[in-house]
Image (cartoon, grey):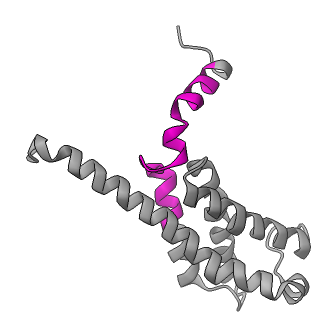
Amino acid sequence: MNVIDPRLAPALEKARDLALLAQRIGAGLLIWTFHMRPKLLRFDEELREFPDPLGIGAPASLALALLSEGLCSVLVALGLLTRLAALPVVFTMLMVLTMAARGFEGADVQSALLYALPYATLVATGPGRYSCDHRLLERYRRLYARFVPPRA
């Protein structure tokens, strides 16, 4: 049973979309300010000391982290390929949690959880109306229809 006055629905939708916009931009700014910027400012040191949780080498692990926290966070902030772009950030933070569980001293559980949560939420909810994805929705549908045949 819906007890909300139907006249409030447009305002509630707008508030939800504005909240998702704030979440996308806020999460992107936070990860850029506190993760990307320090890694870039101390790039040589990071390259020498970066952990290798996947066993692919420290330089490759650092490159993946920079792509995830850099490029993917920008895509999420713009609302472009949001659900897809948020997944690498969540995965990166899960790697931090895995390293913490293994006893790695440099892994901050609290930060990893606080960064993973907004991105995981965006995977579930999508970017909202104020996003590039919303503007491109019809193009996405046409592209999807080209590759996935309709069900009989």
Give the magenta-colored segment's residue range: 118-145
Who is closer to the viewer here, 1 or 10? 10
Query: Is 126 included in the stretch rendered in magenta?
Result: yes
- The picture places residue 74, in percent across and down from the top left corner, at 64, 62
Query: Is 78 included in the stretch rendered in magenta?
Result: no
* Left or right: where 142 falls relative to 54: left
* Left or right: where 49 falls relative to 113: right
| Residue 47 visible here | yes
- The picture places residue 73, in percent across and down from the top left corner, at 63, 63
Measured along the vertical axis of the image, is residue 137 above or below residue 120? above
Q: Residue at x 53, y 62 (%)?
A: 119
Q: Residue at x 67, y 76 (%)?
A: 96
- The picture places residue 143, in percent across and down from the top left corner, at 64, 26
* Left or right: where 60 falls relative to 148: right
- The picture places residue 70, in percent across and down from the top left corner, at 71, 67
Which of the 4 image quadrants contains residue 94?
bottom right
Which image quarter is the N terminus in? top left
Measured along the vertical axis of the image, is residue 28 above or below residue 4? below
Q: Residue at x 55, y 27 (%)?
A: 141
| Residue 1 visible here | no
Q: Residue at x 68, y 69 (%)?
A: 69
Which of the 4 image quadrants contains residue 53?
bottom right
Who is closer to the viewer here, 29 or 105? 29
Q: Main secondary structure of the magenta part?
A: helix
Measured along the vertical axis of the image, is residue 98 above or below residue 73? below
Q: Residue furthest top?
A: 152
The tally of labels here is 0
